Amino acid sequence: MIYNQYLQSEHWQNKRVEKLSQAPICQVCQTDKNLNIHHKDYQLFKERTGELLTLCSTCHRLLHFYFGKQIRHKHLSKIRRLVNFGIDRKMAFYISSKGQGGLYTTVLAKLKTL
Ligand SMILES: [Zn+2]
Ligand SMILES: [Zn+2]
């Protein structure tokens, strides 16, 4: 089955509604507008709700742009932390994508001294 067909299936529509009722805001920027459900792995028909993420369309696009398909919880927690410090969302995705430690560690250390 093609992924696009899958997204139209009743199974997926039910999953989507279930996830949206549990997590009705973007799990990065907390908006409730233009929400998408992202698959952390592409286990079609077998996905568990915990493997899905609610993201607004902007965060979803940024996530795939910087991290491709392999999105981990640690990426999201880094991004959220930076956003909570008031860092611009696009910049937060960029900083978090720059490898282990590296830019993220430097920026976070600076933010903590403010
Ligand atoms: Zn968002
Ligand atoms: Zn996605």
Image (cartoon, rainbow, N blue to C red):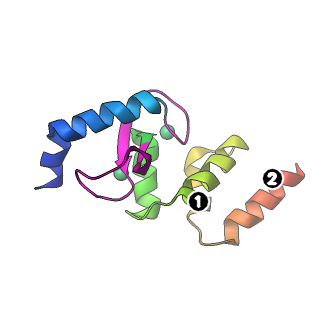
Crowding at mark 1 (Cα within 10 Å: few <14, some 14-19, many 20+): few
Q: Which residues are magenta?
A: 26-53
Q: Which residue is mark 1?
A: 74
Q: Is residue 97 above or below residue 63?
A: below
Three-letter code for the amino acid on which mark 2 is drawn: Leu
Residue 78: where, in percent of width, then height?
Answer: 63, 55
Would residue 67 be seen by someone viewing this image from the given angle?
Answer: yes
Three-letter code for the amino acid on which mark 1 is drawn: Lys
The residue sitting at 60% across, 60% down in the picture is 96
Q: Earlier in the sequence, mark 2 or mark 1?
A: 1
Crowding at mark 2 (Cα within 10 Å: few <14, some 14-19, many 20+): few
Q: Which residue is mark 2?
A: 111
The residue sitting at 27% across, 53% down in the picture is 46
Q: Quadrant where the N terminus lies? A: bottom left
The residue sitting at 39% across, 40% down in the picture is 57
Q: Secondary structure at mark 2?
A: helix
In this picture, residue 74 sits left or right of residue 24: right
Image marks 2 and 1: residues in contact by CB distance under 8 Å: no
Residue 3: where, in percent of width, then height?
Answer: 18, 53
Q: Secondary structure at mark 1?
A: helix
